Image (spheres, coloured by chain):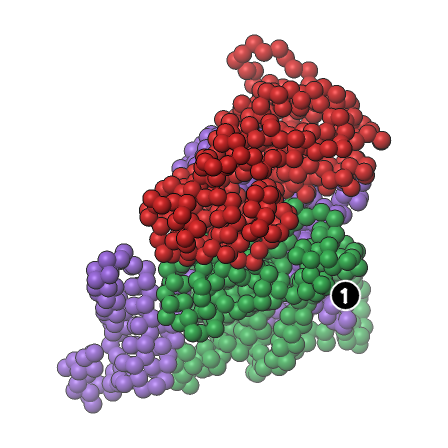
Amino acid sequence: MTTATTPREAIGTSHTLTTGHLPRWSPFVLLGLSWLVFIGVFLLTAASSKSEFNLVGALFLGTVFFDIVIFVVSYLVEGVRQAKNRLVTSLVSTAFIIALLPLISLVYTVTLKGADRALDLSFFTNSMRNVTGAGGGALHAIIGTLEITAMATVISVPVGLLAAIYLVEYGRGALARSITFFVDVMTGIPSIVAGLFAFAMFALLFSDPGIRFGFGGSIALSVLMIPVVVRSSEEMLKLVPNELREASYALGVPKWLTIVKIVIPTSIAGITTGITLAIARVIGETAPLLLIAGFTASVNYDLFSERMMSLPVFVYTQYAYPGTDAQAYLDRAWAGALVLIAIVMVLNLVARLIAKIFSPKLGR
Amino acid sequence: MNFTRFSRAAVIATVGAIALSSCAANEGAAPSASNAPVSTLAGTINGSGASSQGSAQEAWIAGFQTANQKVTINYAPDGSGAGRKAFIAGGVNFAGSDSALSDTELAGTFGSCVAGTKAIDLPIYISPIAVIFNVAGVTKLNLDAATIAGIFKGAITTWNDPAIVALNPDAKLPAATITAVHRGDDSGTTKNFADYLNKVAPAVWDKAPADTFPYAGGEGAQGTAGVVASVTNGTNTIGYADASKAGKLGVAAIKVGSSFVNYTAAAAAAVVEESPLVAGRGDSDIAIAINRTTTDASHYPLVLVSYLIVCGQYTDVKAGAVVKAYASYIAGDGQKVAAAKAGSAPLSATLAGKVSKAIAAIK
Amino acid sequence: MLAARQTGFGAVIGSNRTRPQRFSNRRITEKPSMTKTVARVSARQRPADRIFSGTTMGAGILILVALAAVAIFLVAESLPAFLANPKELKGSPSSFWEYVGPLVFGTIWAAALALAMAMPVAIGIALFISHYAPRRIAQVLGYIIDLLAAVPSVVFGLWGIGVLAPFIRPFYDGLVQNFGWFPLFTGPVSGTGKTILTVAIVLAVMILPIITAVSREVFLQTPRLHEEAALALGATRWEMIQIAVLPFGRPGVISAAMLGLGRALGETMVVAMVLSPAVVYSFVLTGSANPLTIAGNIALNFPEASGVAVNALIATGLILFVITLVINSVARYVINRRKAFSGAN
């Protein structure tokens, strides 16, 4: 590259602040150039071997190539420290682009295949009762998912948050250590085992070997959700500066009030992020709900009796057991997936709103 | 960040959620257009079992619930083993299963049945199993049992293997490696497929038929949908799946006697019709030992029979009445419905008669 | 966004301190002499404090009870499998351990691959959002990554089998043709792309958001003064991150990795739907015969299992439980050793 030989910088000595620096635009130009190079290379190989032109591959390799080029150029012009800095900057951005690729592909696929039915109002007003082939909807599954997940959240968040408070603010000794440790262990319970456990427990409690009900599903999901809530809340509570607590104690505020009024509000953004992630983690669970909440084609509002459908189970069964008109089933599966993602997105927004309302108002 | 916009979105979402929680448009006591006599049956019955008959059950449930507005039937396609287990424990009112109850299961007790009475197996779902393939340039393929067994066992590895070429002299078979896709999960489809190969080509397929695919080679896929997806998305692939799920994939004709037979509903029903019953069972119990080695060219012996397992006499009389009515619907009008909606082969008249007689004896 | 404001808040408070000190909050509550001098005030507060701390402890104990119940259930249901004749298990192995061995291997191998792929990318994204991207864009970017967490595993399964596997299969062909000498890419190549590497990629994408989200929040909490001090000494941005952000965030990042690993180890649906399984010990990334994971095995075989096979499946669940226990103990040990260097309280 010839960036270092532009007239202004060639004079050098009179501009001590800018000597030995790449101009601001250089990374962008370099990135564009390396993309162009690889698109060219890919076009040539595609033309010579008559294969399809791969834009994603070209952009990806171009980005990787850019990472190397920027390091070398910067090393030559700016020295090793700046070169490292630039390398990391570009690597970090590359990481972000890499993560975006599957996301874009997923969202694109789901939207493309699901939008047809998900934009159709009948999808939200119909259940699958007496429906075979085309038509029908996911009302029963949406209601089930919302009720079961809401109940699981109502159980998990207080328990998880209080346990996290205990661990951070009060806990010491063997009890706290064992809670911390076993919460970690709990994150490793496979979801299907949680379902089996809930099923075995309720079958025993109600002495009904075929028990299936929504509340059981909430319990199974809580087993999966609590450790995530504890773990993320614990991390966030730990990050609240001790000076805040000490200032509060110094003003004579009792400890519990300090926690409620100072510690939790300060970390509320992180905690809600954690809770939202925990909900997102369990709302898509299929296996445990299939075992304990069951499978039905009809609407059921009652968490405490009879089988209750949920969206993941709906998506899975529509995909796995289609009738002769397989396309109608697949369409419903993708539409269900789209609705499920949309629900979590809305929850995410609501959580952020709540966090906004309760976190301390600071002028900045 | 503009939070009023977000809060507006949240409000819309909440209102939407409330709107959702109204009644489903297709539910409730919507009177049907026909002047059918009002059914007196009511209540909820639950079933569980084989996923193979899942879409047929869906069609039957829809038909039966339409005729009997106050009845709700749930059928969970949890798998044959899970279904039989739940039925034996008394957790469900009926089970669907790809294999009939075993002798040890029959010797035990059944949770939903009156003490001392036994459960019965009713064949209600016949589905041909198709050998599906996806090879560029090949639309028609003839295979015999020994070749199929060789391919899935891993003994035949390329598409231009002499054994395949000999059966398909006209096809343009590539020199590519065969990717044989089998069921990665345990399934009745695998058992029936293996039973056919084991009976017809015992020299090649030397393992006893079981729910688990017995050999190490090839690729596994979950469920019929997984096999179909793998065969469709891969190249030079072959697999086996319920014929109704084959879609646009190529389907091989299998050798019966001296001719190659494509699956048809009639040919599948015919072979079941001609097959003997399993000996030494109760009068109402209709377990079929499929005659795989038939040489009649009007038969398609690669077929799966799935059973409805019900009590001979129910402790819960009301549930028993619903199950009985539901079973007779399945064995009668339901067969045509399932053929249209799930692609199954309707029972032949003789077999349907036998099943109906067994159902009439349910108390 | 909000966390960013807190950083500011923390920095304002932090600017009053003379030196960062590990001030245990116990000291204040535990000193009996202090409470005695203000006896009247603290006497009025004590019941509420007790109720509150009691409630939090109760929540903690409830978790232990729930876990104990799960463990008791697992052990009770597993025992018949350990005691049964191993010939009755699937594949009639000579012992239960022969049955479970390949599954343990597959579980750890798949999760390790997924974590190895996800960790660098996740930390990169977290840094990008917390320290590189302009604040306004960062909020949106964070939201986009959270969106990944919202995708249910069934959908990842559908995507894996329908989009990723066919897309990536030609790459595997190329890898095996050109690098077949390398043990990880020994042929023959899979004809469908449903290999353990594909599964690991999907798992990596799935655990990415949870690792990113926690790491990001932790990085954002780095004391502003530490960062500014590093920059003031002439550090480049990367050096500042090395000096101030990473040491501060390390325990949180390890914690995040454990959360991600927990999900990767226990993920059921994706493995069951995407992987082409076999009973093997194999490191090959691109072949047809891939070791199955414990959770995937349960999902595949539970529906048709009966008798002692069910107990065997639950016993493998117990073993997964133990694996997580061991991995977490190691992680805890690492965190505790590093604690002294971290800036967190």
Mark 1 nearby-residue class (10 Å; few <14, some 14–19, many ≥20): some
Numbered label tally: 1
Identify the residue at the far front of this view.
Answer: B258
The chain that appears green in the image is C
**What secondary structure is marked by label 1?**
helix
Q: Position of residue B278 (x, y in %)?
A: 70, 33
Rendering quarter of residue C48: bottom right
Q: Quadrant of the C terminus of chain C?
A: bottom right
Determine whether B95 is above or below A312 in the image.
Answer: above
Query: Could you tell me if residue A267 is visible in this image?
Result: no
Residue B107 in view, yes or no: yes
| The residue positioned farthest toward the left in the image shown | A7
> Where does the image place residue A164, in percent across and percent down from the top left?
67, 62
Q: Residue at x 36, y 77 (%)?
A: A87
Question: Which residue was labeled with disc 1?
Answer: C41
Q: Is residue B15 or residue C323 the one in the foreground? A: C323
Residue C65 is situated, as x and y percent measured from the top left of the image, at: 77, 58
Q: The disc numbered 1 marks a residue on which chain?
A: C
Q: Residue at x 71, y 52 (%)?
A: C309
**Of all residues shown, which one is farthest toward the bottom?**
A13
Camera-side residue: B48 or B266?
B266
Residue type at mark 1 is Val
Q: Does C19 appear above or below C30?
A: below
Location of residue B253 with respect to C184 vertically, above or below:
above
Q: Nearer the viewer, residue B82 or A277?
A: B82
Q: Which residue is rendered at x = 74% and y = 59% of the image?
A: C86
Which chain has been coloured red in this picture?
B
Q: Is residue A180 left or right of residue A133?
A: right
The residue under the point 43% across, 74% down is C181
Residue furthest out toward the right: B116
Which tint is chain A? purple
